[in-house]
Image (cartoon, rainbow, N blue to C red):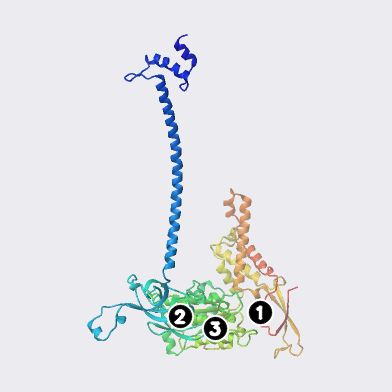
Amino acid sequence: MSTHESADQAGTPQYGTAHSAASAAPHYSAAFGSTSLPGSQPVSVQEYDAVLRRLSAAEATRDNMSRQIRGAGEKNRKLVEAITSMRYQVERLRASLSQNVMPPLNSAIVLAVHEGQTMTYEQVADDKTPAEIDTYLDVQVSGRMMRIPVSPLIDLSTLTPGMTVLLNDKTEAVLALDTEPFGDVVTVREVLDEQRVLVDTSSGAQQVARVAGSLDIEQLRTGDAVTLDTRTRMLTSQVPASRSQELVLEEIPDVTYEQIGGLGAQIEQIRDAVELPYLHPEIFERYHLAPPKGILLYGPPGNGKTMIAKAVANSLAARAAALNPGSATRGYFLNIKGPELLDKFVGETERQIRDIFVAAREKAEAGHPVVVFFDEMESLFRMRGSGRSSDIETTIVPQLLAEIDGVESLQNVIVIGATNREDLIDAAVMRPGRLDLKIRINRPDAAGAAEIFGLYLTEDLPLDAAEVAAAGSVRAALTSMIAAATGQLYARTPSTAYAVATVDSSMIVGSSNAATGHLSTHTLYRGDFASGAVIRNIVDRAKKAAIKEQLQALTAAGASGAAEVNGAAGVGIGTRHLLEAVRAEFEDQVDLPPLPDIEDALTVAGVRGRLVSVEPPR
């Protein structure tokens, strides 16, 4: 067997053993022809094996050093984190030590700022001292008045009275802070001059206070709420408008007389009383006739008293703009709901009433017509002496009378009151010279109801196509629907009876029943309790019923038949919807009408006497 055959049989040479070293020499000798590389010294098998061992050891050393380097890097990262944390703790400790060593800074409130100036010979001759000429501040510290120097680091132009400054251990102002907007809330009574204001405190006393630099004295008005720093008697900030001012002052509403139905006579009376004196003041002055100061609108609820007041304000604003084209004249409507002004604190309601008239006079002095509208007037100006637990009306009523009859005129201001119970309002408010004009807003009759129906049933509404075709036009169909609904509402049949009232008229002088004391019964019908609000609700019910029918038809027809359903007969508002709405409107009211409504209906019907009982119709 040759040497090559022995090598092949042994397989791949293994250089880590003596056998591999012994067998490698013939192999390399056969491959290269000698045991040396070209151009180099001959290499023995032992030397080659030693080189391989050294390479293997170097690789192991390299791997070991790589592991050590990685371990050292991780240790270095942890060391950096520890040093950073230690540095942060050292900085905190240093800051804490600095604060403990630094003396505390006292705070002071600036009363006056005096800018310095260069001392002249004339000032020296006048015995002026540096304390009078140098830059300094008059401050208050712990209740004491002091004059202190100012650090050059503070910009003197930023200092104003009322600001807080910090003082170092040498009593020198070193840092300026903002004005504190805190303190007791007081009311401005009068602005005396550029620096002094007379205010009313919560205890009822009056004080003269100075004004901080953060408060613009030119913006202060009588009745404004401001904060008072009791330490310095300085007004520091203005409190936002009171709730009453925010709620009542609004620009003119967009309601017009044309949107009110069934009250033509009352509207004409109001326009004559309110608009003519404003449009032709010179004629009224020539006749020595003063315009009315106020109007009282009374009557059952839901008949348009609030809408009339808004329409008056809108009409006045339109007339004012027409008289002064190009000017910024506009109308204002102060809507006061009586219960909103009631307050548990004594005198607070009176203050809010004063604020309302102050705001009205401010707008009126600028030439703007102002309507002050008191809704639910009986809740505020109730008859004095009628209270059981308290008599707050004994001070609220005189406050209103003082505002109406006060020295300050109410030119361009009209007071309108609305109430459902005029019998509860104090007689002093009702007398001529205050609420001069008293207009009863009655429930609509059949003609008035038809007019109100026409305001809500307009030609742009979807109507039943069959009824429109039968009537010949949309207008004719609407007229027919309105006539049917009105007839049903005012029908006086057993089916439309609503209540039966028993009245004792024996105490009425001149009554035919005075001697016998006979009790009379009177049947009241649906039409006796109709109102604008009821009619609107009837129309809304009819619209909902028509919408429901159309949705049911669309669901039954599916998407393919939607176009046919929308234009088909029976879709839209029809007479049947209105008649059903009239019936449902009254039948859904299970309880009987309130007693005041029944008494009002009897009064309108001409029935006088004491209401004994009310029963549902049989």
Q: Which residue is mark 3?
A: 347
**Residues at marks 2 and 1 touching, judged by CB atoms closer than 8 Å:** no
Circles 3 and 2: CB atoms closer than 8 Å: no
Amino acid type for the residue under numbered disc 1: Pro
Residue at left 47%, top 86%? 206
**Separation of disc 2 and disc 1 at Cα?**
57 Å
Q: Amino acid at mark 2?
A: Arg
Choose top left, top right, bottom left or bottom right for residue 264. Answer: bottom right
- On the picture, is 173 further left or further right than 515? left
| Circle nearer the viewer, 2 or 1 | 2
Mark with earlier residue (3, 2): 2
Q: Which mark is residue 322?
A: none
Q: Where 518 falls versus 487 (above or below)? A: below
Residue beneath the point at 41% across and 76% down: 108
Residue 269 in sight from this viewpoint: no
Q: CA distance from mark 3 to mark 2?
A: 26 Å
User: Which residue is tagged 2?
Assistant: 231
Q: Nearer the viewer, residue 349 or 411?
A: 349
> Which residue is identified by label 1?
596
Q: Nearer the viewer, mark 3 or mark 2?
A: 2
Q: Earlier in the sequence, mark 1 or mark 3?
A: 3
Indicate whether 434 appears above or below 57: below
Looking at the picture, how far across and down is residue 174, in whole percent? 37, 71
Q: CA distance from mark 1 to mark 3?
A: 32 Å
Label 1's element? Answer: helix
Helix or strand or loop: what does disc 2 sit on?
A: loop
Depth order, front residue of 508/334? 334
Label whose residue precedes the other's in the sequence (2 or 1): 2
* Number of disc labels: 3
Q: Does residue 143 show up?
A: yes
Instruction: Where is residue 13? Give x, y as percent.
Output: 46, 19
